[in-house]
Image (spheres, rainbow, N blue to C red):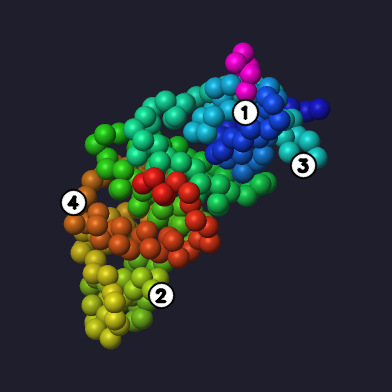
Amino acid sequence: MEQITLSGIVLSAMPIGEYDKRLVILTKERGKITAFARGARRQNSPYLAGSQPMTFGEFTVYQGRNAYTLTAVKVTKYFSETVKDFEKMSYGMYFLEIADYYGREGLEASDALNLLYVSMMALTNEHIPDRLVRVIYELKALVINGEYPDFFNCSNCGRSERLNFFDVKNGRLVCAECGDNIKRLVHLDDSTLYAIQYIITAKLSKLYTFSVKEEVLSEMESVITPYFVSMVDREFKSLDFI
């Protein structure tokens, strides 16, 4: 059978039988795939290290009727080794779960894969708060999948000035004038709105090149995370450890 090499990251690994593993891999070329690693649980297996979640690299596979079979792995990065702190590891697993949620087989996923990679790298940077990495990842995942609200104009009147309120319940931005008639709005400082707009428009390589004050981060969390939760229909297990 013809073999192909795909760039990707292991999202999850499940034991199968006595020595095998069932891998879910997010790949640049073919989106989310299922691949079986024969003998991956043997101590001398060439797939032993490369079949762990958070392993980024090149995966050589051949395609069967319903799944792929792994034949070689060239590891580029072991995030499970560089993200050693338990809380950081939990954030990393959360990102993998989100990538798995949005991943689709057969659909090119270079943006989703690159977002996951730069976000995992950000977790290894002690100068970037994990909470900031989380809200950036959540928002940019929504952007890539076309599910983010308009953060550039008032949803009611269309104006682009004084956009200081977010209606979390209905997932919409409103200006100061329109916000007078709406209850339970989250206030957004100008710096918070600018940070959110930057995340939406920035290239992936520039996502983690800024910092924010605690009050700005808190406002971002009060808007982005509830909206993200409202847009997905799955509970992510890793959140229990964050």
Residue 16 on image: x %, y %: 68, 33
Which three-letter amino acid code belongs to the residue tagged 3?
Answer: Asn
Which three-letter amino acid code belongs to the residue tagged 2?
Answer: Asn
Q: Is residue 66 visible?
A: yes
- Identify the mark nearer the N-term, 1 or 3: 1
Helix, strand or loop at mark 4? loop
What separation in Å lies between label 1 and label 3 (alpha carbons)? 17 Å
Q: Residues within 10 Å of mark 2 (few under 14, many from 20)?
A: few
Residue 91 on image: x %, y %: 39, 43
At a point 38% along the width and 74% down the height, the residue shown is 169
Numbered mark located on residue 170 in the image: 2
What separation in Å lies between label 3 and label 2 (alpha carbons)? 40 Å
Question: Do callouts 2 and 1 mark residues in contact (Cβ within 8 Å)?
Answer: no
Asked if 85 appears above or below 192 in the picture, the reply is above
Q: What residue sits right under mark 3 in the picture? A: 66
The answer to whether 197 appears left or right of 54 in the picture is left
Is residue 75 highlighted in magenta? no
Helix, strand or loop at mark 2? loop
Which three-letter amino acid code belongs to the residue tagged 1?
Answer: Phe
Q: Residues within 10 Å of mark 1 (few under 14, many from 20)?
A: many
State which quadrant residue 82 falls in.
top left
Numbered mark located on residue 190 in the image: none
Q: Is residue 70 visible?
A: no
What separation in Å lies between label 4 and label 3 (alpha carbons)? 49 Å
Numbered mark located on residue 213 in the image: 4
Which three-letter amino acid code belongs to the residue tagged 4?
Answer: Lys
The answer to whether 87 appears left or right of 79 in the picture is left
Q: Which residues are magenta?
A: 41-46
